[in-house]
Amino acid sequence: MSYTSDTEAAKALTVHFDTIKRSIAKVIVGQDDVVDKLIISILCNGHSLLVGVPGLAKTLLVKTVADVLHLSFKRIQFTPDLMPSDIIGAEILNEQRAFKFIKGPIFANIILADEINRTPPKTQAALLEAMQERNVTVAGENYNLPKPFFVLATQNPIEQEGTYPLPEAQLDRFMFHIKLDYPSHAEEVSIVRNTTGVQDIDLPKVLNADEITYFQDLVRRVPVPDNVLEYAVSLVHKTRPGNANAPEVAKKYIGYGAGPRASQYLVLGAKCHALLHGKFSPDIEDVQAMAMEVLRHRIVRNYKAEAEGIGQEELIKQLF
């Protein structure tokens, strides 16, 4: 992998992106926007929270992305009795009566944290700390997680009994909150046809870990015009009801707005979105393309908004 310039690398990334999408489409029918956002979050070195009802192929989607990107993949099913050591790993006494660290499932490139809201806060915190620090500490020893490292956590929006909802401060660790909707009638017909017959799909390996790390650095190097930067920060400021320039809808319906991390992810996501669509610098449309997923879990509605049935998405649209 050698590129003579960032421009050449950016063009190569656009080609890789199209190939990745075509490869994933062999297994996953529809869900184009979800696939786009997953790839963007990986290339931005962020994490994503995926919310959708059971049976929408969340696990299959993430495993397919891992296969195409030639990355190691682990799925962790979160349950009420799951302990931090079940995720991170633990020290055991070996035959020589010396302690040896046995790595947990978190030591993989892509982690699917299935139903993260079903496990107690102590275990949630262990995962979220690893997400933030990109390493874990056991018995005073630091262990670096592999690069790239991407966590996709899922939540079931229906069953809320026996769950431990993530606090806003922990939700803020996720770059994107991605909603997974039901497939259309035509898409579901295609899904049923494909999955009830004999399947033998050979997925090509499009990128590897080193190439992904290189493109993550490339995204960081993309220049951003001042007006786009100002727009992203202004959009986040509009979500804060205590801000002097906050619109009336924010003062009326929002309890707490998004923090500076939202501005960072808006700009980073816009950079990547621009690259993947053949542009060498983001514009305001690229920021708007990221806004729903970046702000959806960072806006806390007040009681008035809940009473009137006004959701986060409607509020975000009014803020544009």
Image: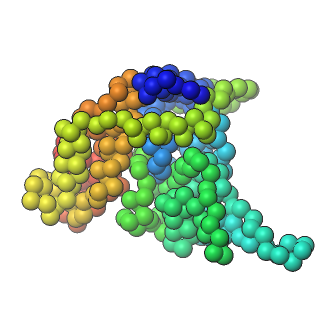
Which quadrant is the C terminus positioned in?
Answer: top left
Q: In percent of the image, x 48 and y 69: which residue is there?
A: 164
Q: How many marks?
A: 0
28 relative to 79, above or below: above
Along the viewing direction, whichever of 177 and 14 lies nearer the viewer: 14
Q: In percent of the image, x 48 and y 50: which residue is there?
A: 47
What colour scheme does the image use? Answer: rainbow
Along the viewing direction, whichever of 237 and 308 lies nearer the viewer: 237
- The image quarter in which residue 19 lies: top right
- The image quarter in which residue 59 lies: top right
Q: Position of residue 131 (x, y in %)?
A: 52, 58
Relative to 141, is 48 on the left or the right?
A: left
Q: Position of residue 296 (x, y in %)?
A: 33, 51
Residue that lies at the very extreme toward the right in this rendered image:
95
Q: In percent of the image, x 54 and y 49: which residue is there?
A: 150
Relative to 303, is 144 on the left or the right?
A: right
Along the viewing direction, whichever of 215 and 243 lies nearer the viewer: 215
Q: Position of residue 166 (x, y in %)?
A: 44, 65
Q: Position of residue 82 (x, y in %)?
A: 63, 69
Which quadrant is the N terminus positioned in?
Answer: top right
Relative to 292, is 184 on the left or the right?
A: right
Residue that lies at the very extreme toward the bottom in this rendered image:
97
130 relative to 27, above or below: below
Q: In percent of the image, x 65 and y 70: which residue is there?
A: 141
Q: Can residue 104 be seen in this view?
A: yes
- The image quarter in which residue 272 lies: top left
Q: Can residue 292 be seen in this view?
A: no
Residue that lies at the very extreme toward the front in this rendered image:
4
43 relative to 139, above or below: above
